[in-house]
Structure formats: structure tokens, C-alpha cells
Image (cartoon, rainbow, N blue to C red):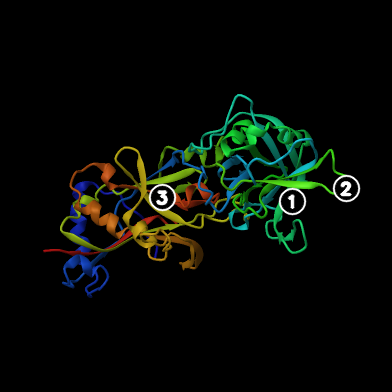
């Protein structure tokens, strides 16, 4: 059965509340019994509450990884037929393997950057040729090791240190690294020998601590672009110290053998961040941004787009205990969509606390648990295949039982108290996106299913 979300005036909503009761189910339900002080009463059901949706750009997000704990960082360019162009570049410091190395009278043989692919983070078409470039942060700039950087921040760059052109990323193909035993999927990027020699020629004081070395290094930028129509956002695990590193090959003047010595620099322990850009010019999504959305709504990772959801009359449903509240949202198959661009893997609810603090809602946090590792099985927010009137769809169901009870109990009348947001999760570590049917779609409208008990 298909439903259409209806926008009510306050008077009409009050009148229809009684109608919901008249047609409600009449069997007891243990779900939400803790809200009733152990009194199991008959419950009512409705899925016709008014919803108002607006598509908004996401606020800037902290993308720094000062603690070296993130699974991967994005690098690449994606040309989405619906969402336009998205791009991510990485700024990073590298850290000395050992402090105070002896490079006196040393000469460079070669210097190579190795980047470990992170297959789970890839998004786009890996069968299109990529070009990756490494630049030095400009002379008048510095990537700080003690500062947090946001997704909208960037640094000026100077010299090109190295590049690999026309390669096809192979994130699941393991190849040997420095021996036949150590194998994994990675990318090899030769860097300029002049850069290697500069590192060897640093004065001994600059090599006595990480901070003095970073002051000389300033940082590097890793960027990529695609030669194809779609492109890809690649993901690199810079915190894998086995594969992700810069290896410097060198010799001393006094060496009598041909074999080079090596010294490694690692990303682990150094600050790094991702800079995201989104260009919606001319894209199908552009007219929807910042506007009330009826037929279609959109969400996007990498600090892209989020969905503002207002439930303006929730507080009028007074004297009820919410047994279960669940938002149902269906992915829309749009003309021109690329099969390589799968719908978002995970959605969450967020809310604004105070004026600026954005947090996950209580239902999301309850599912994740106190350690934030419990997963989303109790909350939902992931796509499942369902057949609706003979059509197979990707449908997301998201729990907002606790949050909706708070809306019901809040009598301020302030629409902010009746507002939450749908975000791709994790926003700074997901390149996925999705289009959904909106609240007034005649196909599969977004709707809020509410099961509740009247408290007398």
C-alpha cells in the first residue's frame, strides 16, 4: 500500500488525531512498555504526520587526524551525474623514523612515496585512469602539528614533488612491497630526487625533534584527478605504517658497495587532514539546495548535503507514550544515475544543541552504546531490499522513538525543538550519497510511522 504525506493545519491535525484512534489497532504491545510504568495498554498507529524537508549544505567538519586513528582518508575527483563534482585532497606531515639520523655526506639515490589503498572507502569507477600528484606546501605556509583543520580549509602549495599519470587504481590487488612476504594493495609514487637531497642536507638540529623537522618540511599535499567521465574518490590508509610511508634511498660518499641505504618517514604520528570541495553548478541537484523539498530529497557524504526534517505538529500529540517511532525513506532511481555510485551505506539522525553544537540523536547514541561501538542494528539507517507494490526498492528505516517522545513532551512551540537532520554517516569518512523520494512524492513518500499509547 502506498501513502501520501499530508500537511495539516493545527486544527485539522487535532481533528484527525481522533480519527487515528478510531482506526488504530487494539492489541497490546510490549514495545516501549518501559514508558508506561509496567502498564500495558492498547496502542494506536499512524503514518500520516506532516513532514517538511529542506536540502542544506553540510557545515564544515573536522577532518584532522592528529591521533592517527582514522581508517582512511579520501583523495580524488568524482563527477556525479546527479550531484555534480566532488573532490578531496590530503594535506599531511610525515614523521622521522628515528630522531637525529646521521645524513652527513649522504647523497640521494631515489625517494618514493607508498600509499596503502583502503578498499572499503573507495567510491566511483576504478576502471577509469587516474593521475595523482604530490606537492610541497608553499614556503609561506605551514601545516601545524598542534591544530585541528576543517573540511573547508586548504593550504597553498608550491613545488611539484612527484606524480603518477594514467594509472588504474587496484584497491583489492595485493602486490609485493619490499620483499615477497609483505604484500598488499598500494600505490607507488616516485618523488623528485631534489626533495630527497634537501632532506639529507637538513642541519642536524632540524632532525632532533619532530616539531623542528615539521617546521622545515611544511607539509605535503596529495591530490588526484580522473581522465574519465565519472572518476573516483580513492581511499588511502595513511596510518598503515607498513605500506604508507616515504622511503629515502641514499649512500654516503665513503660507501664502496652499490647497495643503497634506506631511511623511512611515516604518516603515523603526524597531523593530516582532508579538504573537500563540491561544485553543484548545472547539476540536477542544484535547484533543490536551500529550498523546501517535495518530490525529491538528497543526502551526501564528504561534508556535502544533509536533509533538514521538521515535524511541526509533534507537540500537539500530548498525553501519549511513544511505543515506537520510525522514519521510512526510499532511495529514488533517477535518470542518468551511474550504477557505480551505490546509495549511501548508512544514514543517521543529528540535531543541533544550543546554537552550534551538532550531535547524534539519543536513539542513534543508544544503539551505538557508551563506547560508540555497538553498531546500528537497533537504530537502522542502512538500505534493505523491499518489494512495494511489485517494485523492488532500497529502503531505509530509522528509529526516533526517544527523540520523538521529547518532541511530544516539549511545549515550547519552537520549530527548532521539532527539527532533526538526516546525514550520511560518517560524514567526513564517507563519499557515498543518495537521492530519496520526498514527503509529497506520489511514488514512495518519506513518512513517519508512529505507534503510541494514550496516557489517561
Question: Are the residues flagged by discs 1 and 3 in contact, CB closer than 8 Å?
Answer: no
Comparing 441 with 198, the one in front is: 198
| Quarter in which the N terminus is drawn | bottom left
Q: Position of residue 91 (x, y in %)?
A: 60, 38
Q: Position of residue 262 (x, y in %)?
A: 75, 47
Name the residue rendered at 50%, 62% in the picture.
393
Question: Are the residues flagged by discs 2 and 1 in contact, CB closer than 8 Å?
Answer: no
Q: CA distance from mark 2 to mark 3?
A: 62 Å
For discs 1 and 3, the disc positioned in front in the rendered view? 1
Q: Which mark is residue 433?
A: none
Crowdedness of circle 3 by 10 Å Cα count: few (<14), some, many (20+)? many
Residue at numbered disc 3: 422
For discs 2 and 1, the disc positioned in front in the rendered view? 2
**Secondary structure of residue under mark 2:** loop
Comparing 271 with 167, the one in front is: 271
Mark positioned earlier in the residue sequence (2 or 1): 1
Residue at numbered disc 2: 257
Q: CA distance from mark 1 to mark 3?
A: 34 Å
Q: CA distance from mark 2 to mark 1?
A: 37 Å
Q: Position of residue 206 (x, y in %)?
A: 63, 33
On the question of residue 221 being in view, the answer is: yes
Residue at numbered disc 1: 168
Question: Are the residues flagged by discs 2 and 3 in contact, CB closer than 8 Å?
Answer: no
**Secondary structure of residue under mark 3:** strand
On the question of residue 169 being in view, the answer is: no
Amino acid at each position: 500500500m502506498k501513502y501520501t504525506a499530508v500537511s495539516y493545519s493545527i486544527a485539522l491535525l487535532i481533528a484527525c488525531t481522533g480519527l487515528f484512534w478510531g482506526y488504530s489497532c487494539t492489541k497490546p504491545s510490549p514495545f516501549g512498555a518501559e514508558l508506561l510504568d509496567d502498564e500495558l495498554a492498547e496502542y494506536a498507529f499512524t503514518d500520516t504526520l506532516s513532514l517538511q524537508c529542506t536540502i542544506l549544505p553540510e557545515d564544515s567538519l573536522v577532518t584532522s587526524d592528529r591521533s592517527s586513528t582514522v581508517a582512511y582518508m579520501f583523495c580524488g575527483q568524482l563527477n556525479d551525474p546527479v550531484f555534480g563534482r566532488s573532490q578531496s585532497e590530503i594535506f599531511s606531515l610525515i614523521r622521522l623514523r628515528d630522531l637525529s639520523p646521521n645524513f652527513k655526506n649522504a647523497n640521494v639515490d631515489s625517494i618514493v612515496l607508498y600509499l596503502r589503498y583502503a578498499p572499503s572507502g573507495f567510491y566511483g569507477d576504478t576502471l577509469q585512469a587516474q593521475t595523482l600528484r604530490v606537492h610541497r606546501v608553499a614556503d609561506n605556509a605551514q601545516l601545524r602539528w598542534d591544530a585541528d583543520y576543517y573540511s573547508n580549509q586548504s593550504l597553498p602549495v608550491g613545488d611539484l614533488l612527484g606524480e603518477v599519470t594514467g594509472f588504474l587504481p587496484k584497491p583489492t590487488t595485493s602486490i609485493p612491497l619490499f620483499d615477497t612476504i609483505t604484500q598488499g594493495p598500494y600505490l607507488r609514487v616516485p618523488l623528485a630526487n631534489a626533495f630527497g637531497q634537501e632532506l639529507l642536507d637538513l642541519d642536524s638540529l632540524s632532525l632532533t625533534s619532530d616539531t623542528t623537522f615539521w617546521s622545515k618540511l611544511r607539509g605535503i599535499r596529495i591530490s588526484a584527478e580522473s581522465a574519465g567521465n565519472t572518476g573516483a574518490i580513492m581511499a588511502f590508509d595513511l596510518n598503515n605504517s607498513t605500506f604508507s610511508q616515504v622511503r629515502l634511498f641514499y649512500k654516503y660518499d665513503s660507501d664502496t658497495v652499490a647497495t643503497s641505504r634506506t631511511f623511512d618517514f611515516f604518516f603515523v604520528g603526524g597531523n593530516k587532514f582532508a579538504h573537500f570541495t563540491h561544485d553543484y553548478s548545472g547539476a540536477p541537484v542544484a535547484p533543490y539546495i536551500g529550498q523546501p523539498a517535495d518530490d525529491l530529497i538528497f543526502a551526501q557524504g564528504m561534508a556535502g548535503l544533509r536533509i533538514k526534517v521538521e515535524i511541526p505538529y509533534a507537540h500537539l500529540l500530548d498525553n501519549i507514550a511513544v511505543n515506537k517511532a520510525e522514519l521510512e525513506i526510499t532511495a529514488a532511481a533517477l535518470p542518468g544515475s551511474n550504477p557505480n555510485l551505490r546509495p549511501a551505506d548508512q544514514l543517521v539522525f543529528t540535531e543541533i544543541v544550543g546554537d552550534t553544537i551538532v550531535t547524534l540523536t539519543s536513539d542513534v547514541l543508544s544503539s551505538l552504546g557508551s563506547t560508540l561501538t555497538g553498531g546500528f542494528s537497533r537504530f537502522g539507517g542502512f538500505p534493505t531490499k523491499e518489494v512495494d507494490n511489485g517494485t523492488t526498492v532500497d529502503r531505509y528505516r530509522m528509529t526516533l522513538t526517544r527523540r520523538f517522545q521529547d518532541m511530544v513532551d516539549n511545549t515550547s512551540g519552537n520549530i527548532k525543538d521539532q527539527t532533526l537532520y538526516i546525514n550520511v554517516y560518517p560524514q567526513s569518512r564517507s563519499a557515498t550519497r543518495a537521492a530519496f523520494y520526498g514527503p509529497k512524492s506520489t511514488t514512495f513518500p518519506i513518512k513517519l510511522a508512529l505507534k503510541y499509547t494514550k496516557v489517561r
